[in-house]
Amino acid sequence: MSELRKPMASERVGPKIFGPGAEPLLDSHQAAQFLGVHSRTLQRMVLRGEISGVRVGKLWRFVPSALAEWVQSHSIAS
């Protein structure tokens, strides 16, 4: 059953968030617009663990390539 658990934060490998060559982070409004959902819906998805996000103080930030990967992994093959 260990295959069904979500990976711990230390086990996740993702795009570079800071440093040289890092992608600029999107705020929740930009990320929601990218996904076509309301910003509050996006925040709920993060809290449920469906989408990865970074909380900076009270604000959420998102890596664009991580959002694109999420869309790709959740798209239905035609």
Image: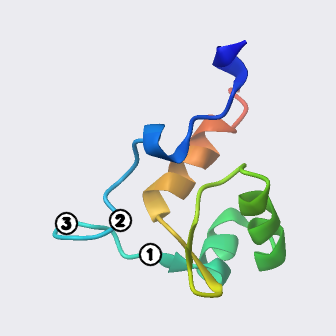
Whether residue 69 is situated above or below residue 21 in the rendered picture:
above
Question: Which residue is identified by label 1?
Answer: 25
Whether residue 5 is situated above or below residue 39 in the rendered picture:
above
Which is more foreground, mark 3 or mark 2? Answer: 2
Residue at x 62% of width, y 47% of height = 71
Quick check: marks 1 and 2 in contact, CB under 8 Å? yes
Residue 21 location (% of width, % of height): 19, 66
Q: How many marks?
A: 3
Residue at x 46% of width, y 37% of height = 11
Which picture quadrant has residue 39? Answer: bottom right
The tag on residue 21 is 3
**Tag 3: Cα neighbours inside 10 Å, few (<14), some, or many (≥20)?**
few
Amino acid type shown at disc 3: Gly
Which picture quadrant has residue 28? Answer: bottom right
Query: Real-space Cα distance between discs 1 and 2?
Result: 8 Å
Out of 75 and 48, give the one closest to the viewer.
48
Residue at x 47% of width, y 64% of height = 63
- Considering the image in quadrants, where does the C terminus appear? top right
Of the two numbered discs 1 and 2 on the same chain, state the one appearing first in sequence.
2
Amino acid type shown at disc 2: Ile
- Considering the image in quadrants, where does the N terminus appear? top right
Question: Which residue is identified by label 2?
Answer: 17
Quick one: SS at disc 3?
loop
Query: Real-space Cα distance between discs 3 and 2?
Result: 9 Å
Residue 66 location (% of width, % of height): 50, 54
Quick one: SS at disc 2?
loop
Amino acid type shown at disc 1: Leu
Residue at x 58% of width, y 87% of height = 57
